[in-house]
Image: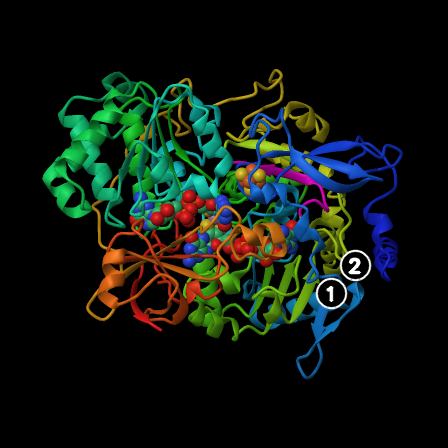
Amino acid sequence: MKLQIEKTLRQFDGPLTQELVLEPGKFGLGHLPGKSQPDATTTTTCGFCSTGCGLTVHLKNGQAINLTPSTHYPVNLGMACPKGWEALTPLAASDRATVPLGRDVEGVRRPLSWDAALRTFTSKFKAIQAKHGLESVAFLSTGQIVTEEMAFLGALTKLGMGMIHGDGNTRQCMATAATAYKESFGYDAPPFTYQDFEESDVLVFIGANPCIAHPIMWQRVSRNPHHPEIIVIDPRKTETAMAATQHYAIRPKSDLVLLYGLANRLMTNEWIDRNYIAAHTKGYEDFAEHVRSFESERIARECGISTDEVERLARTIHEGRRVSFWWTMGVNQSHEGTRVAQAIINLALMTGNMGRPGTGANSITGQCNAMGSRLFSNTTNLFGGRDFRNPEHREVVAQRLGIGVDRIPDRNSWAYDQIIEGIDQGKIKGLWIIATNTAHSWIDQNRLSRILDKLEFLVVQDMYHSTETASRADLFLPAAGWGEKEGTFINSERRIGLTKKVARAPGQALSDFHIFKLIAEYWGEGEMFREWDSPEAVFQIIKRLSIGQPCDISGIADYQMLDDCGGVQWPFPSGSETPATHRRLFEDGRYYHPDGKARFIYETPREPGEVTCGEYPFLLLTGRGSSAQWHTESRTRKSDILNKLRPSELLIEISPADARRLGIQSGQPVSVASRRGELCGVAHVTSTIAPGQIFIPMHHAMTNRLTYSEVDPYSRQPSYKNGAVRVEKA
Ligand SMILES: Nc1nc2c(c(=O)[nH]1)N[C@H]1C(S)=C(S)[C@@H](COP(=O)(O)OP(=O)(O)OC[C@H]3O[C@@H](n4cnc5c(=O)[nH]c(N)nc54)[C@H](O)[C@@H]3O)O[C@H]1N2
Ligand SMILES: Nc1nc2c(c(=O)[nH]1)N[C@H]1C(S)=C(S)[C@@H](COP(=O)(O)OP(=O)(O)OC[C@H]3O[C@@H](n4cnc5c(=O)[nH]c(N)nc54)[C@H](O)[C@@H]3O)O[C@H]1N2
Ligand code: SF4
Ligand SMILES: [Mo]
């Protein structure tokens, strides 16, 4: 064992360490074209958004030199958005991390050898655990590393290092959808396939802006030959709303009232599918009683649209033969997001729009592997969507991993916000952050910053040493990025796609996989991970863990099969025939609850915790700014091309009426303040935003100084799209 560590480290010593990362003639995967074919290509899956586009990488001497969208991949059919086209560029950025970094006695960052870095990691975290208990060290991870790495991290920390608390940035993103599905369907199972975009005759987008956030999904909508009605429910007149046939600019956070009102209209008019309700659902009668008081006049009053609009919307849903409902962050990031998502699910269930082509209650995912994180990261759920608190589940997992069941925690982890609270209260002293930029993307940044100061030891593992979070680290570990390692992503339509190593990581940067493997050895748990030898070996372990669960993928032989099939959608249990190109769930009307029936779940709508007032009269909305910007922009800012496709300044979108009243013109500097912080930007006067609201893109590090920390009580996802602010000429 010791020999193995030494050998690995020797190979990463010094500047020219790449030979081990990329063996000549063995290009990432064994079956890829080797060095001798200078004009070879290979296929991979994009590492930005959850669309999961297939990309064809053009190679010279085994190295990626260019890429184009894959024409035959069933997801994108030859298309890619600007980020996909530019995916290789961020790998060559000048702030790529090439060596581990520690801090000297003065606190100045200094390069460390991997050996010293790993020793520091181990001794510091072990000392904290010895003094304050095993739970005093926690981790925060991501939806942007491959499933194999997520599984490794989840096993290493919770089964190997004795941690209880570890969560992902998927909490900021998909927790609401996951919770809603689990309660309504009995399992976290987005039912759709992208083909549904093309097969619907009515598409309803709620709190989603796919023109910007999922451009290639939107392309699929554009290919729909049925002249569909496209309905957008969004307080802003977004790019998607402009392209829609109907736009309802409802008052922010009034979705639940609107959706219950629609259920009321459908019910009152008998526009429901009684057969479907009787055969496949439970709880309809109580739900019908609940929505009785949501009459059109009330909806109009509370949502800020007319009664005629309510009627038209209900009628359009009724008249559609194949109606699909799609939602994203306008729903998930809300104080009552879980119930809003379930209100959408209820509409699909009561109208029988489930399980048929072009239908479904469909949550669009965000990050390239948020779906992998939901199932296999071992954070919120025990591997495979199981429950840490269930002794039988723990027993199964222990058996399949060949470990003692006592190694598996019998409690759930704290959620992201609770981990932050835990740091504030001194319960968590050590934190390991992997592939997420907490010091930019988490809510209420001024408060977060004060809390992070309380940590005794912060480790950050990222591709770049320059991120807001990396700059705060006591120990920094340099990671390889997408394209420099292999593994699988699971996209929004449950498709497991393969991503490959087509470039060398710079300097001594290692794949997250390698880093976890080394940490396992240094921690003294190498033996537990003997079988976890390569991403593909871990893929086989994940397959084993999935058996018997709705996400069973034991029928996927290996990586080669994923490559050959253009990805495979779960479920795909062993014994399945060749996977069809498109598969949706619930075609037989059987859901995952023991009785096979979906549930109608509802609750009384309530006001968010912060509302506008005289001092803070504007409601703040945040979200994606352009298709060329990715989150905290650690990657997209590194591309000159993408930089040309985004605004060069932080734009504050404000309505013409408000701008006039405040004497503000487009291009003028403005300041925005909330109870928590303030920022300066440039006014963008536009009628896409309603009076009384402003919109600020999330991509700037200052945006989250303003945001208000409130979480949905069931999913614990933060409500990033609500807060009261003041706007002034700067
Ligand atoms: N270019 C680009 N694409 C991305 C990303 C990126 O950073 N850049 N990120 C990816 C990720 S991780 C995610 S999660 C997705 C997010 O994808 P989306 O959710 O589509 O994007 P957002 O802009 O965050 O929010 C969508 C809309 O919600 C609306 N909204 C706000 N409040 C409400 C409300 O109360 N009700 C309703 N109905 N709507 C409301 C906003 O006006 C906004 O237009 O995008 C993914 N794709
Ligand atoms: N105000 C506001 N805030 C928001 C949102 C909003 O709508 N409004 N949306 C929220 C949502 S939905 C999301 S998903 C989050 C996203 O928030 P973050 O996860 O913080 O955003 P990213 O910029 O994607 O951060 C990913 C980090 O991982 C690094 N990285 C990339 N690939 C790898 C890898 O392979 N290995 C390692 N080790 N590192 C890697 C990148 O350099 C980057 O620093 O933001 C949330 N924050
Ligand atoms: S739509 Fe998403 S997956 Fe497709 S190329 Fe763009 S960022 Fe990549
Ligand atoms: Mo997200």
Q: Name the quarter where the C terminus is drawn.
A: bottom left
Residue 689 on image: x %, y %: 30, 52
Residue 101 on image: x %, y %: 71, 69
In this picture, residue 620 sits left or right of residue 98: left
Residue 323 on image: x %, y %: 33, 24
Reading the image, the residue beneath label 1 is 100
Residue 485: say if magenta.
yes
Reading the image, the residue beneath label 2 is 508
Quadrant hosting residue 105: bottom right
- Give ligand 3's quarter of the image: top right
Which of marks 2 and 1 precedes in the sequence?
1
The image shows residue 138, relative to residue 53, as above or below, that is below
Image marks 1 and 2: residues in contact by CB distance under 8 Å: yes
**Magenta residues, dominant SS class:** loop
Element assignment for label 1? loop
99 or 554, which lies in front?
99
Q: Residue furthest bottom?
A: 106
Quadrant hosting residue 613: bottom left
What amino acid is at disc 1?
A: Pro
Q: Is mark 2 within 8 Å of ligand 2?
A: no
Q: Is mark 1 within 8 Å of ligand 2?
A: no
